[in-house]
Image (cartoon, grey):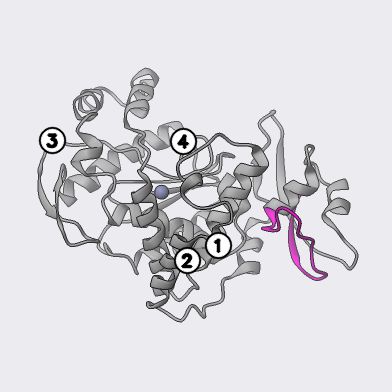
Amino acid sequence: MRYAAVLIGIVLAIPTLLAGCAPNPVSGENQLSLMSEYDEVAAGQQADQEVMAQNTAYRDASLQAYVSRIGQMIAAQSDRRNLPYRFTVLDDPAVNAFALPGGYIYVTTGLMAYLNSEAELAGVLGHEIGHVCARHNVSQASWGAVGDIATKVLGEKLGNPELISTLTELTLRKYGRDQELQADGLGAEYLARAGYDPAYMVNVIATLQAYEQFTGGASDPYRDLYSTHPSNDMRLQQLIAQARQYGPGSRDPGHDAYLHRLEGLRMPLGNGQTVQMHLITARPGESFETLAQSSRLRNNAAMHLRLLNGLFPNGEPRPGQLLKTIQ
Ligand SMILES: [Zn+2]
């Protein structure tokens, strides 16, 4: 993911100078790595300070605790259960999630607004946990080029905006397509191990693609990873089928439970105004066009409401359905 746009999985990390061969926790193969696990966690801790110097945690302790609970539940099913995972909701309208080495994972309120179940949130967090478990951010290939400069920057005082922007520029890396595919596969596996239907991973990808389509976002490798209709994508279907061996997928996806957590979610519009998410129950005959009339969304409001409710591009509410609106 690009840092300020629709992407899952940018990593900001700080390499240390230790080099060695370590077995990859996911594949079991030896991998030339820059960091021991201890150093990886220390690097994550330091990079977390940088992230939190540039971002604000969403001020809602109960929402933070909720996301942590879902995250820890998925992390407990992962290939690196011993890591000290930390989950933070960032107060940021950009649709984004990313991970640091050592298990520091972030999801923005912007992304949370577009998800529609606990299973989908678990899928997003599972994808990021997948990057951490496969050590996508700590291999020599990722870090060789930036090691020197990042180490120099780290030697300086934290808090100097110039240095931070250099560090961010140099260390925000996009994962390759293979790594994104692997993270989706691991995310699906962890979903299944936790009892969810791994197909919720497809919902997440479809939601991100719909968002890009709605906003006309720039081309991005993650978005282009799958065909335009992810539910028909063969590779994705293969990942989901493989994940199904880990569990029956009968757990309640937590649609309404998740939506209730979003009641009152504050979302800046980018023009100085802040709107709030509000939940309603659809009445018979209600359409997204009628709901759009009372919404504070300006451009293409009916379509935006469909997108928020996972019904893009042509769904309509069922009577009695719990719906997100913006007022
Ligand atoms: Zn990713």
Instruction: Name the residue that disc number 4 marks.
Output: 3
Q: Is residue 194 visible?
A: yes
Asked if disc 2 and disc 1 are in contact, CB closer than 8 Å, the reply is yes
Label 2 and label 1: CA atoms lie apart by: 7 Å
Q: Is mark 3 within 8 Å of ligand 1?
A: no
Instruction: Name the residue that disc number 3 marks.
Output: 17
Region rendered in magenta = 308-327
Q: Which numbered disc, 4 or 1, marks the residue that appears first in the sequence?
A: 4
Query: Measuring 27% from the left and 55% from the top, which residue is drawn there?
Result: 134
Element on which disc 4 rests: loop
Closest to the camera, between mark 1 and mark 3, is 1
96 or 46: nearer the eye?
96
Q: Which mark is residue 232?
A: 1
Instruction: Give the dominant element type of the magenta stretch: helix, strand or loop.
Output: loop
For label 3, count other residues whose C-alpha is less than 10 Å away and answer few (under 14), some (14-19) or many (20+): few
Q: Which numbered disc, 3 or 4, marks the residue that appears first in the sequence?
A: 4
Element on which disc 3 rests: loop
Q: Judge left or right: residue 214 versus residue 146.
A: right
243 or 226: nearer the eye?
226
Q: Which numbered disc, 4 or 2, marks the residue that appears first in the sequence?
A: 4
Instruction: Name the residue that disc number 2 marks.
Output: 237
Query: Measuring 53% from the left and 55% from the top, which residue is drawn there?
Result: 205
Asked if disc 3 and disc 4 are in contact, CB closer than 8 Å, the reply is no
Q: Judge left or right: residue 59 versus residue 190.
A: right
Q: Does the magenta segment cover residue 230?
A: no
Label 1 and label 3: CA atoms lie apart by: 44 Å
Residue 166 image position (x, y, % from top left)? 34, 22
Please, which residue is most extreme toward the right here? Answer: 285
Callout 1 amino acid: Asn
Asked if disc 4 and disc 2 are in contact, CB closer than 8 Å, the reply is no
